[in-house]
Image (tube, rainbow, N blue to C red):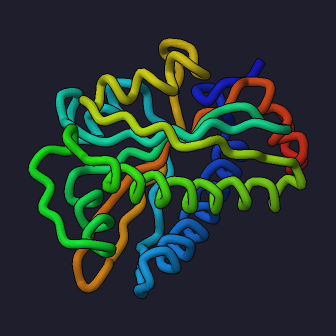
Amino acid sequence: MIAYDNLNELQLDVMREIGNIGAGNACTALSVLLGTAIDMSVPRVQLLGFESTAEHLGGEDNMVIGLRIDLSGDLEGMMLHVIQKRFAERIINTFYAKEIDNISNLDEMDSSVLNEMANITSGAYANSIATLTNLFVNIGTPNQIPGKVSEIMSLPLTAFVQPGEKVLVVDEEFTIDDEHISSNMILALESDSLEKLFARLGVQV
């Protein structure tokens, strides 16, 4: 059985490349959704454990929005988009003016906008993986969960990753109308799916 915390350098490079290509395609999809040009710096792709990831996302008590997208088909797992208040506010304000005081109190329209964003960008990631591996990758409906980073992070760890293992974290840095905003995408695949992915890419496990 293979897990994120015991990948070799070649396997890590493959995961980084998947993160890079996926983030680039997600940026293009986001630009189309918002109807404006978006620049993106080279995404940072790394493997982090629970505590390191929580600190990376602003600390365990930092309030964020988690957008969980389940993966099915030839690969089983999930993508978890973690967005800060300013990112959510910037996306929502593309469609209508609104100041967000508390991300825990988004209304139905706000949530719909963010779900659509997650659906489109997740589709871009999934299509990138499918194109690289020639595997069928289906995405589920976004499940939006506002809460503390510690609560959001428990989702991939309890669903697909064993305690003590690491997850793949992609840092996305965007520039929209001269404003720099960031978001994070966490990819967690089941062990069998990781093995299948590497086998399709000709990487020894």
Q: Quadrant of residue 56?
A: top left
State whether residue 69 is above or below residue 14.
above
Looking at the picture, tell me which residue is in the foreground, 179 or 69. 69
Quarter of the picture holding the C terminus: top right
Quarter of the picture holding the N terminus: top right
| Residue drawn at point x = 80 percent, y = 25 percent | 192
Looking at the picture, tell me which residue is in the foreground, 9 or 127. 127
Percent from the top left, x then y, of residue 86? 20, 59
State whether residue 65 is above or below residue 45.
above
| Residue drawn at point x = 89 percent, y = 55 percent | 134
Percent from the top left, x then y, of residue 60? 23, 27
| Residue drawn at point x = 70 percent, y = 26 percent | 190
Q: Residue furthest left?
A: 101
Q: Quadrant of residue 12?
A: top right
| Residue drawn at point x = 89 percent, y = 40 percent | 199
In-image side of 15 versus 46 (left or right): right
Percent from the top left, x then y, of residue 38? 41, 81
Looking at the picture, tell me which residue is in the foreground, 114 or 163. 114
Q: Quadrant of residue 119?
A: bottom right
